[in-house]
Image (cartoon, grey):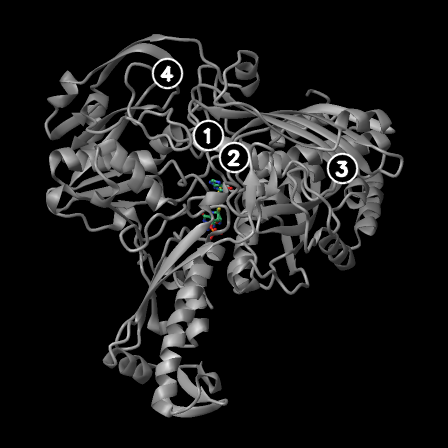
Amino acid sequence: MKNIDANGHVRGESLFIDDILTKQHCLYAAVLASDVAHAKDVVIDIQRAEKFPGVEKILLAKDITGQNQVGGILLDEPLLCEDEIHFQGMPMAVIVAQSDFIAKQARQLIEVSYTQLPVITTAKEAFEKGEFINAARSFTLGDTDVAFRECKYVVEDDTFSNGQEHLYLETQGAYAEKMENGCIKLMSSTQGPTVVQRIAARILGLSMHKIEVDVTRLGGGFGGKEDQATPWACMAALATHILHKPVKLILDRHDDLKMTGKRHPYESHFKIGLDENFKIKAFDVQFLQNSGAAADLSPAIAERTLFHATNSYYIPNVKTTVHSCKTNLPPNTAFRGFGGPQGMFVIESAIAKAAEQLNIPAWKIQQANLLSEHDTFSYGQIAKKVEAQNVWKQLNNKIDIDAVDKSIQQFNQASQQFKKGMAVMPICFGISFTNTPMNHARALVHIYQDGSVGISTGAVEMGQSVNTKMLQVAAETFSIDPELIKLETTNTTRVANTSPTAASATADLNGKALLKACTALLDRLKHVAAEELSVGVDTLEINNGWVEVNGEKTELDWKNLVFKTFWKRICLTENAHYATPIIKFDKSKEKGHPFAYHVYGAALIQTTVDCLRGTYEIDSIDIVHDFGKSMNKGVDLGQVEGALAQGIGWMTMEEVAYNEEGRLLSNTLSTYKIPDVFSIAKDIKVEALETDGHDMAIFKSKAVGEPPLMYGIGAYFAISNAMKAFNPNYQSKYHSPMTPEKVMMVLYGKE
Ligand code: MTE
Ligand code: HPA
Ligand code: MOS
């Protein structure tokens, strides 16, 4: 099935927040953000700004009718600054005016005074000063102390992976309307409608039932709208609550870049030990996560870093520790992979370092340590239906890894200016929210009396095509024309208490709930058909919109059957709930079975570096990916390619830069470069792993949203390897992204 949004998107007919037709007397809000990163004794003077013609009101912390608190995991983040500033970009005031232009003009008239305090921008500095978000966490397996003593080879080093800007095409925004009885309706560009509902209720001092959140779709989220869509919706809600008029608040790109958090930069230290057969026997890491000025989702992201610290390898002795370090940057947040990529970059760096020491290609160490059936992960889960070796084998069949390696060596011997490099990047990503209680979802299905169908779930469409997958679930279960089915908006009054659309688990969780609802309705319809046709229910199927008995088409079609069912006063609505079975995790022991299943894959990446210019090109990427049994090949391929591009961007060219004062330097698209069509591989081939799929996945079609991002890590190592061919003295610093500037300096020994 084609993406059901394809036509609307291409024609510009799809609706985003800024396309909503606002009601009469709509007001527009702009946010004043702090210009310094750390200060106390803050005084905000709005006198001049308030008098600016067209300004209706300027909201400050004191105007908040409920609690000034937007924190989720920890209650440590005010919506609006009270007397302390913790990061540059911290919201201080909301200017509500008759137009966006007026609001922004008035914003410039607000005067802020404060006493500046010292600023911390790096995780290391925060670590040294003892500034943490919460207590550190550690996973252990076996005994690393003993194991390291027995290892033949032990290497250690530091690594750094930088942040990443989400750069969703649609910036953060919300539109709020006051309804009767003091209720508020919010349209929000959020991955978490229930998060927005819960926090807006807290900010306004209302119960959740007075707040309705509606989401049509997002112009991208990538994790940046799991928690960080909430403040703007709360501000719009507060303004509506106080002024009784509709309010629209949309951040322009500049404000969005400045005020929102990004992927977490990590500074880490690893130690890895191998035996004479290149088997990794021990692995020890300390991760320093740069969390920013408040918790946001950092503790959960830190946890996922630990879950993925050994990627798709079996290591019998592991000790991993993560510290969420509190700095004066905007609170960093979820980003595709949710801390997993940061963990995997470190193990891949460790393997690369060991390979350098042993003078063998890294892929030989990777291959020797891939997970096998029944291996234990450091968090206690026993690996089942493991595909780590299968994806590797299939990749090697498709493109002979050793032969590629040899031909690259040959090329490099013959070529002066251009050097080639290759790397293999295996992945293993756990599917389920690591926080077990979040793994449930609901769906509501109405069959209308004319046979058409309306579907509501908790899934948010953000470009990943989850709505298309939901439509497929209903169309296939009922076996009717997809044209009869409509995906409704995601709305908290139709489907309540939803988990955010995240963790790549949305199609599984909501799809399984939807499957249950549709199956229950189908069963009801079949009973009516059996009665109408005087046959046993078991003899009967609905196929392509017609009732069949023992495989023979009857006179009774879907529409008639639906109408007869309605006429018999039988309910044509069903609400179903799904909670992932089996999963559990005991945080007191840091052991359990947190994931429904794992997604595997392997990529071979080849690059060419121009050693005169420091530029590089990705020549080709060959991937074998574990889709399970894909329910929509076009959509899933799109997810692999999109995630891959995003991963390559993170590893090679996207450079988030803050200065020592905590000011974002990469605050425009001219200073923050994302991959374009020229920076992506010229030749990308994605092959599906041959497998039956997994029962815990919807229609056996495995989650696909995040895992392929991590193939991008291979680009870093492929470029590094090419550079080593030019400059044999190059000692890798495991410091990403590998920008062309950095390549230039490394090639000529300047870094
Ligand atoms: N694809 C598009 N086009 N836009 C997005 O914002 N978000 C990614 C991924 N793919 C995203 C995307 C992230 S971070 C996640 S967690 C998953 O989609 C969430 O959707 P799913 O659970 O339906 O896979
Ligand atoms: N992934 C994404 N988002 C989340 C998770 C997770 O594991 N846990 C809580 N929010
Ligand atoms: Mo995705 S980072 O779980 O929104």
Amino acid tagged 1: Asn
Q: Which residue is mark 3?
A: 316
| First along the sequence among labels 1 and 4 | 4
Task: Name the side, left or right, on which 697 lies relative to 199.
Answer: right
The percent position of residue 397, horizontal first and vertical second, equals 78, 59
Q: Which residue is mark 2?
A: 301
Disc 1: CA contacts within 10 A as few (<14), some (14-19) or many (>=20): many
- Give the mark nearest the N terminus, 4 or 2: 4
Q: Which residue lies under the disc numbered 1?
A: 332
The amino acid on which the numbered mark 2 sits, given as a three-letter code, is: Ile
**Which amino acid, mark 4?**
Val
Residue found at x 37% / y 53%: 458
Question: Which element type, helix, strand or loop, lies under badge 3?
Answer: loop
Spatial CA span between label 4 and label 2: 27 Å
CB within 8 Å, label 3 to label 2: no
Do callouts 2 and 1 mark residues in contact (Cβ within 8 Å)?
Answer: yes
